[in-house]
Amino acid sequence: FASTNSGKAYQLEASPRGIHWPPLPHDDEEGWQRLWKIAPYFVKNVATVGAGISEANPHEGGTYPYPILITYASQDADLVYAMTKAMVELYDDYRDGAPGADGWALANQSLAWVVPWHEGAVRYFREIGVWTEALEAHNRRLIERQQLLAKAWQEHLAAAGDLEGEAFERAWLERRAAALEAAGFEPYYR
């Protein structure tokens, strides 16, 4: 997995064996379900730029949303609202400023992804009419998941005693999976 237009991808393309990007056809629902079971952050994508890829030879597969702005839930809601508004409303002013900037377009946002949206961003999305009740329910569930994991982590720290290294990690993964499953969440990995 790599950026299709990285220097290393072009070096590989120029090598004696060339480059091959394994496809994941968008109509392969069973394949996508298997992928999402362990890597829910992937989204469907048709790449047209990169090593061995072009408009004439596109690649149908998966990627993750890029670029991404991340903040803590404790960040000031008015600041996050203003930043979200600026990124959306000023898009035409910066869209050609860097490779990948097309990822900032509102049409390219994955609003029901694996990371919850901040309340300030949600306020802006509501204001412009793109936030739905389904998105709100999904976002609430993601926040619930994060709260559950934070609680499980604190419980793990309190119960871990003298565990170190791999034993500490194994015990955490077991506690994490048990807490997620008990609340109806998919652990994604064990």
Image (spheres, rainbow, N blue to C red):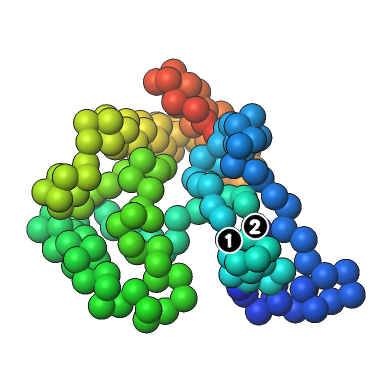
Give me the disc on residue 47.
Answer: 1
* CB under 8 Å between discs 1 and 2: yes
Depicted 63 relative to depicted 28: above or below: below
Residue 39 left/right relative to 101: right
Quadrant for residue 55, please give it: bottom right
Q: Can the viewer see residue 93 in this picture?
A: yes
Amino acid on which the number 1 mark rests in the picture: Ala
Q: Amino acid at mark 2?
A: His
> Residue 174's x, y, as percent?
56, 29
Name the N-terminal-most of marks 1 and 2. 1
Q: Dot 2: few (<14), some (14–19), or many (≥20) neighbours within 10 Å?
A: many
Instruction: Identify the residue at horizontal 11%, vertical 49% (top origin).
Output: 127
Residue 59's label in the rendered image is 2
Report how far apart the C-alphas of labels 1 and 2 lie in the structure: 5 Å
Percent position of residue 51, x then y: 69, 71
Farthest residue in the right direction?
A: 16
In this picture, residue 53 sits left or right of residue 132: right
Which quadrant of the view contains residue 50? bottom right
SS at circle 1: strand
Q: Tell me the tag on residue 3.
A: none
Regarding mark 2 in the picture, which secondary structure is present there?
Answer: strand
Q: Nearer the viewer, residue 93 or 170?
A: 93
The part of the image, by quadrant, that contains residue 156 is top left
